[in-house]
Image (spheres, rainbow, N blue to C red):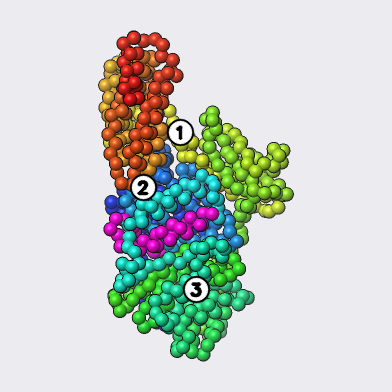
Amino acid sequence: MAKRKTSQEGFGKLLDAWVPPEGAGDPIGVIATSFTFDAAFFEEECLATFLGLETNPTDDGPAYLIEREDKLARLQCASVLVDAHHCRGSRSLRWDLLPARLPGIQHAKVSLLVWSNHVRLMIGSANLTEDGYRRNLEVFGVLDFHAGSDSPIECLLETASFLGRAVRYSSTTTPAALRWNTLLDRVESDCAGWGTREADRKRAAVQVKTLFVEPAGDSADHRGSGFDQLGRIWPADFGPKSADIVSPFFDPPESKNAPVDRLWQLLRQRGEVTVGYHVAGEECAGWEELGHSRWMLHAPESLCRTPRQSGRVEFARVTPPESRPLHAKGVWLQDDRYAVYQIGSSNFTSAGMGIGKRSNLEANLVYVLDSNRDGKLFKAVEATFPKSELVDPADVTWQPTPNDEDADALSQIALPTFFGDAVYSRDANGNSVISLEFLGERKDGFTLLIEGTDKTWFDSNRWQTEGSPTKLTLPWETIRPPSGFEVKLDDQVGAAWWPVNVASPDSLPPPDELKDLPLAVLMDLLGASRPLHRVMAEYLARKSKSDCDTAVTAIDPHKRVDTSSFLLQRTRRLSWALTRMRERIERPAATIETLHWRLHGPVGVMALAEAIVREAASTSESAFLLAEMALELSRTNIVPAMGCVDVATHRSEVYKLNQKLRTLIESDNETNGPSNLRAYVESVFDEVAQ
């Protein structure tokens, strides 16, 4: 086993893969999985990059909140499935956080990014954390799918199926799980023709396949262990001559280390074979003078075991660039012609490779290389294997890292399965409520604390007083909905986290900066060609400055004259805004959420209508302006567009909104005013209804 060299080709920054490719179209949704998790990093870095946000929370404050709200509200789904031990963190309820509970751990690292014209699949070793994306040495693969792409479509469809099974470890009925599955259904139906089939790639120099490890069960989709799958993927009649393993974690030293035996079974059974382990380690300071081992390797000595005389074991210390901690995982199998390279989340452990009593949920990509077809490509992929230097096992002190990052999970309190779904919504009267689901019985007490405080919101005594119900809906009196509750458990030290998801994005209150905007501001927003957050930033700056100009306005009598209430002038000013509003509404909507945001969001049509009613000088004026709005909406010219809301649904939503405009006039109790104006308003709505 020779020392492997690296080059810049094949290396990159993970966050760059979240940047929309050219021609990707509108963002549709994101589905991701992770073991450890940083909610702030995912929201402010990953999602922000995916959405193409121009602002950031540090420098732009309210403008960032406005842009984030505006763009997240248009997504069909943004959701992360995280192992229950690490499923925590304050966040915007515009995206869902789902805890995965299974006998092992949820260890897969998958990101599925969906735009209207493009889907990107990322599978690798990095968690959705700052360390995973910016500090560790990680490995990841990216597959792009679009019309005419040559990526293997089986990888996309198989991953979508895997993600559908993975979410079952959290919930099958919660609205968040339904949004997750709806996006997967869209990918499977709309993108099935966006790649190449295996039959068309038989002579390709590289094949790409998926390798998923899942707990054994009755599922027909269970593929067996990682070793079973590698054996089926290996393209030659005889097994590989060599295997190189890179992993930061292994089975504990006191164990049999079953993955070692399974690896040797995978190799060619006759002739010389070599197994190399590439592990983290360091040179011991002063080893010559002090007379101890030169190297300390973070691996168990059980890796040295060789089941047959013709086998050889070698060890290499990974030397990552810039001393990055090793977190990459990989298996490289090779003979004289072929190589199979597995990368992803599976450590070289029994749970990671699916041969233990408790298998993890893991996701990997496997690259099958043929040097006879393209030797240059073969070497380019080989060069991405972590750089390392050989170490003499006789000169090593073995100090394995505690049984992979799973050990960190033991320091976190996982939410017990007794706590089901927590869902924020609004009741029939428009009041905020939170529905809690309790599964089974619980003898030990618990307390739910309001996010960021020590204040009790609910506890086991009240639950028992209510009759220990399976489901309970409670009023939420704070303006902002919670992203979760700290759960104090009487039988454990510390607290678990119970994430809250939203029943429907429409029930979320807008940011304070977008609430009840003045009519003049809404007209500026609708009439502007610039992004919402830029116009709002200017408005907020003007609003702040206006407080300083109050005295000047009071002195100058001309500045005290407000002509904005004059019907003729207001109508002229509104006319341009209504035209731009219609143009905005009739544009194809990539998701139904995008359309609802245009119609019912805080800067949508209904917000404009409510501002007219609120600020009109008279009921006659509001009735006339609402009629003009309805007339303009009735002229929308909706054209079909691939991957967007169908024309019939689009028209139906606009029609229903026009009916609401009529209701606003009726609720405004229009009994007075000129008879000809009342007749005009009635004729407009009669025409619109037809």
Q: Are marks 3 and 1 in contact (CB under 8 Å)?
A: no
Task: Please tell me whether mark 1 sits on a helix, a strand or a loop.
Answer: helix
Give the CA separation, mark 2 to mark 3: 37 Å
Res 513 seen here: yes
> Residue at position x 46%, y 69% from top?
329
Q: Which mark is residue 512?
A: 1
Seen from the viewer's position, the closer of residues 26 and 54 is 26
Q: Disc number at residue 27?
A: 2
Residue 227's disc is: 3
- The answer to which quarter of the image holds residue 447 is top right
Q: Quadrant of the N terminus?
A: bottom left
Nearest to the observer: residue 325 or residue 506: 506
Q: Where is residue 371 drawn, in percent x and y?
A: 32, 78
* 20 vs 468, nearest the viewer: 468
Residue 86 in view in this figure: no
Q: Residues within 10 Å of mark 1 (few under 14, many from 20)?
A: few
Q: Residue 612 sits in which quadrant?
A: top left
**The C terminus lies in quadrant:** top left
- Kindly identify the residue that appears in the image at 32 percent across and 28 percent down: 633
Range of residues picked out in magenta: 139-168
Q: Is residue 240 above or below residue 664?
A: below
> Nearer the N terminus, badge 3 or badge 1?
3
Of badges 2 and 1, nearer the viewer stands 2
